[in-house]
Amino acid sequence: MTQDGQPAARSHPRATREAPRAITGTSWFMRLAGVAMRFGLGAAARVRIEGDLELPRTGPLLLVSNHTSNVDPPLIGAWLQPRLGRPVQFMAKEQIFVPALRPLLRHFGAILVRAGGSDVDAYRDALAVLRGGGVVGLFPEGTRSADGTLGAPHPGAALIAARSGVPILPVGISGAHRFLRRNSRLPRFGTRITIRVGEPFRVEAGEGADRRATTEAATAEIMRRLAALVASDQRGRWG
């Protein structure tokens, strides 16, 4: 109890960080999980995938996407994993590394990101996975959009891409915010969801005084690429 008679908040131990390794193939469990996820989401929503589907099956890749729903990571993982031949190792917030999900997240090589600002260790882990030839997935906005439109991005994606020099694969998701809204527990069955894959591109790394301006320009380029891949009503100021 606290001094004012209220029950004390229950503290939860922080998830232990384990440096992920680059995963360059798929296990039988990953393939089975992908099939189950495509079946489950395909039965609940009308999911289709469009765009450049000849994806690189080897070499490092940074996948960026808009973020409007909790189903975004499983959508991307389930539909793109077979085309990539390896899982997408998402940068995921610490809060979801609960004991029940931790083994699954570890198996798929998720990269833990601490709350409360810049996480240098997560940044280094992402670079390590890319150097090992893996696919790192992240959402430049950092959190789910409240209304489905593209919001203000963080510079992390541009920094990682510029530092590593790897190609960026933009993926736009349209309709997921209508299927499972933020703070909603039940999905809206039958919603149309479109996953649109763009062409890989690269950004330049700035030097010295130009680094900040170059990072801002690269971040804006990433957001414009994503805006071109989502429905017009989800583009926000990037449209």
Image (spheres, helix red, strand yellow):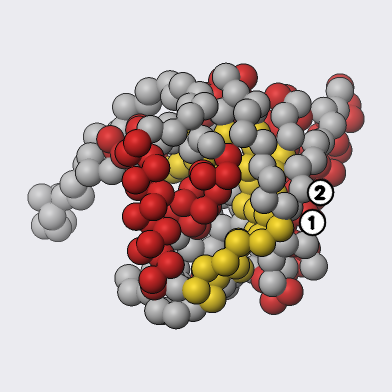
Q: Secondary structure under badge 2? A: helix
Q: Which residue is mark 2?
A: 221
Tell me: residue 33, above or below residue 152.
Answer: above
In the rendered image, the residue lying farthest to the right is 210
The answer to whether 180 appears left or right of 163 in the picture is left
Asked whether the viewer can see residue 238, the reply is yes
Residue 191 x, y percent position in the rendering: 49, 78
Secondary structure at badge 1 equals: helix
Q: CA distance from mark 1 to mark 2?
A: 5 Å
Number of other residues with Cα within 10 Å of mark 1, as a class: few under 14, some 14 to 19, many 20 or more: some
**Count the marks: how many?**
2
Q: Quadrant of residue 196?
A: bottom right
Q: Residue at x 79, y 41 (%)?
A: 201
138 and 95: which is toward the camera: 138
Q: Nearer the viewer, residue 168 or 155?
A: 168
Q: Is residue 115 left or right of residue 175?
A: left
Name the amino acid type tagged 1.
Arg
Q: Which residue is at 80% across, 67% downward?
A: 239
Picture coordinates of residue 92, whole percent (x, y): 46, 42
The residue indicated by pointer 1 is: 224
Towards the viewer: 7 or 112: 112
Q: Position of residue 98 (x, y in %)?
A: 27, 42
Q: For this view, does 75 lie left or right of residue 229? A: left
Q: Label 2: few (<14), some or many (≥20) within 10 Å?
A: some
Amino acid bearing label 2: Glu
| CB atoms of marks 1 and 2 within 8 Å | yes
Seen at 20% across and 50% down, the residue is: 9
Q: Position of residue 100 (x, y in %)?
A: 22, 44
Residue 152 visible from this viewpoint: no
